Image (tube, rainbow, N blue to C red):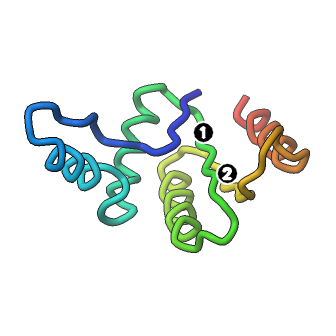
Amino acid sequence: MGFVSTPYAKDYREDVHPVESLARFLLDSQWAGAAIYQREVIEQQIKKVNARGLILYGYLGCSFGSVAREMWRDYFHKNGIPSINLEGTFQTGDATGQILTRIKAFIEMLA
């Protein structure tokens, strides 16, 4: 199992001015460009950890994230990687019962 919160493509560069390093970090990461570039980073991580499935999680009300996650879900399903798309809130404490139930069922399906 792997976990990617924000799939950055690389670390900060130390061989350039700090402002340029920050700009390059943002432009080379998932924060810049189309969801296809983010998907490529997720694919790399799937291969790296030999994942059998993908849990996509986002926050309610973030329509841009919801669209990207649905595109990724469709793409990975077509390429033989099962996935589940979950949405929740900025909660503190333990996950809700509904989220845990869905994750447990997904993991059982993968076994």
Task: Tell whether 111 sits left or right of 75.
Answer: right
Dot 2: few (<14), some (14–19), or many (≥20) neighbours within 10 Å?
some
Task: Give the amino acid at mark 1.
Answer: Gly
Dot label at residue 53: 1
- Coordinates of residue 111 in the picture (x, y in percent): 73, 28
- Coordinates of residue 109 in the picture (x, y in percent): 76, 38
Residue at left offset 74%, top offset 57%: 88
Earlier residue among tags 2 and 1? 1
Q: Are marks 2 and 1 in contact (CB under 8 Å)?
A: yes
Task: Give the amino acid at mark 2.
Answer: Ile
Outermost residue, left side: 16
Task: Tell whether 31 sits left or right of 27.
Answer: right
Quadrant containing the N terminus in the rendered view: top right
Dot 1: few (<14), some (14–19), or many (≥20) neighbours within 10 Å?
many
Dot label at residue 84: 2
- Coordinates of residue 58 in the picture (x, y in percent): 63, 57
Element under disc 1: loop
